Image: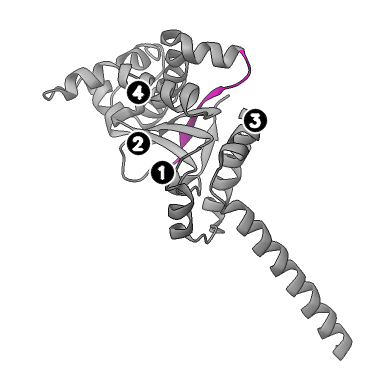
Amino acid sequence: MLSRRHFCCSGAIAASLLTAERAFAADQCEAFTKASQSAITPDEALAKLKEGNERFVSGRLLNCDLMAQVRTTANGQYPATVIIGCIDSRVPPELVFDQRIGDVFSARVAGNIINDDIIGSSEFATKIAGAKLIVVLGHSECGAVKGAIDGAELGMLTGLLAKIRPAVEANKEAPGEQTAKNGAFVQDVAVTNARLGAEILTKKSSVLSDLVAEGKLKIVPAMHDIATGRVTFLD
């Protein structure tokens, strides 16, 4: 038979754990300030995203006061991270990484392609606004990647899909049917597209390449699995 003392001790431990969990959540819910943005390193910003995705996958999301964050960020924003992702409705960056108001700059375009506007936006977010990390986020079953593989043409979309063709060509030696019906091929092209996107950022932007060389910025490609919610960082 369990004693009253056992129940008291168990209750005290549970209360202590709950207090610690609430304290952790409160700390995580604080919007970035200029000081906290300045203090965080590129690797710490990456770790923060990894922790957030783990919370997302496990269903242990932080319960933050979003209106408090609205008030905190009303006079300034200091995100630590830029996420360049696809417009796919199944891959909302803030949700996938369990981030909130003031945490990330989010640039979304079909196929997470890199063009001059995306590069310019990234230069603003890092050099001017102080972000320390850029993630080029691809995902499984990407419609834009499938369209590029099959050579789809439609208005201005044709030009957009052309920017994914280098990833298709890079996989021309892959085995099996090289069409959108081959899931493995689609995944290989999507991974390559994310990797090439991360490379293009520094190849085309001296602003970004200088920040990377100085250790002030990290650029990494990643893939989101729409079936599990999990993000895998490729570098």
Residue reaching furthest to the front: 75
**Residue depicted at 47% across the width and 29% down the height:** 129
Residue bearing the label numbered 2: 141
| Disc on res. 118 | 4
Residue 158 is labelled as none
Q: What residue type is disc 2 on? A: Glu
Q: Are marks 2 and 1 in contact (CB under 8 Å)?
A: yes
Above or below residue 203? Residue 100 is: below
The image's mark for residue 226 is: 1
- Left or right of 72? Residue 217 is right
Quick one: label 4 or label 3, which is nearer the N terminus? 3
Which image quarter: residue 4?
bottom right
Instruction: Say what secondary structure mark 3 lies in.
Output: loop
Within 10 Å of disc 3 (Cα), the crowding (few <14, some 14-19, many 20+) is some
Residue pictured at 61% horizontal, 58% vertical? 26
Magenta segment boundaries in residue numbering: 214-226
Instruction: State the residue position of label 3.
Output: 41
